[in-house]
Amino acid sequence: MSEFKELVFSGVQPTGNLHLGNYLGALQKFVALQDSHECIYCVVDLHSLTATMAHDDLADQTRSITAAFLASGIDPKKNIVFNQSQVLQHAELAWIFNCVARIGWMNRMTQFKDKAGKDRENASLGLLAYPSLMAADILVYRATHVPVGDDQKQHLELTRDIAQKFNNDFSRRIAELGYGVDMEVGEEKVNGFFPLTEPLIDGAITRVMSLRDGSKKMSKSDPSDLSRINLTDEADAIAKKIKKAKTDPEPLPSELGGLIERPEAQNLVGIYAALSGTTSTSVLTEFGGRQFSEFKPALAELAVEKLAPIAGEMRRILADPAYIDGVLREGSGRAREKAEATMKMVREIIGLIDG
């Protein structure tokens, strides 16, 4: 029996402008992965409907995320770049997974509890079933790896649970059709149709916090634009936001232990380390003992050097929506071909007549 070919899938939801945290935590890693893996990068526009069905700017937001992919260095010829709604097999497999997953599994999802709040009975079914569609996004390509942050680990665990239950429920049929693939589950070698997708964590996960409050994650929904550096910000705006970033009156420490209980200092040091491709320890070796009045200009210069070209390229790409639509159309065609190959086998496994 053959084994699963390594394939990376990741998706970004088109809600709000992407910012520095998205770049360091996701896009920068996406660009690096394309040199070592076959990658599929998706703008998950169907997922955005769980927040609200009325999206006057959904098409523009989808193009903006695509432009960020391209401006960051993702090659749409080498990888597949597309938007989810153009590949209907995602929704088809999600329905099948709705019939595989258990309601108890969905009710335990932390993100559902957070977003639904106290009025859970009034939340949409789509919000509850969101992880099932996410599982379909990944498994319709039988992807083996997904780069994840802390907030998505539980969803990936659910994806693995759904894959394993499908494999178990239809094991006899999978074997009869010869559709099984060998894989490792712990120390045991088993055979199944869907892979148990693994998280892909390449080095330390960069968690970028708000420039106005080091205890909160940088967010595109924060009402203060000074809390984040948007990928579309021009050089002057980037420098201004770093200059105005909240700090404390103490100089930078010379060792990591000195950053404990100093969230804003820790955040700015971490941003410098991530942008320069080094470590926080190295940053403190260089800047330890100096005041923020010296450190912030150095950080601003570095941020402008790294981010301003991306912002300029994004603006250039966004000025040509026809080009973006062409990238998405071409990528969707390639994605649809892969997804349909999976779905033809899924339909046969579960007994659906496929015309």
Image: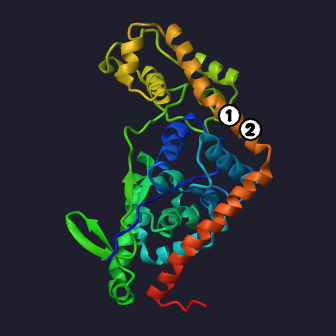
Can you give x and y, in whole percent of width and height, for residue 28 in the image?
A: 52, 40
Instruction: Name the secondary structure under disc 1.
Output: helix
Residue 341 relative to residue 88: left or right: left
Q: In this view of the protein, which residue sits in the foreground, 289 or 345?
A: 345
Q: Residues within 10 Å of mark 1 (few under 14, many from 20)?
A: many
Residue hosting label 2: 315
The answer to whether residue 332 shows anywhere in this view is: yes
Compared to 268, does 1 lie above or below? Answer: below
Q: What element does badge 2 sit on?
A: helix
Q: What residue is drawn where x is 54% and y is 34%?
A: 218
Q: Is residue 289 above or below residue 340?
A: above
User: Which mark is drawn over residue 311?
Assistant: 1
Q: Identify residue type, mark 1.
A: Ala
Tell me whether circle 2 and circle 1 mark residues in contact (CB < 8 Å): yes
Q: Position of residue 156 (x, y in %)?
A: 41, 58
**Res 245 visible:** no
> Height in image: 95 above or below 77?
below
The quarter of the picture where the N terminus appears is bottom left
Q: Is residue 279 left or right of residue 328?
A: left
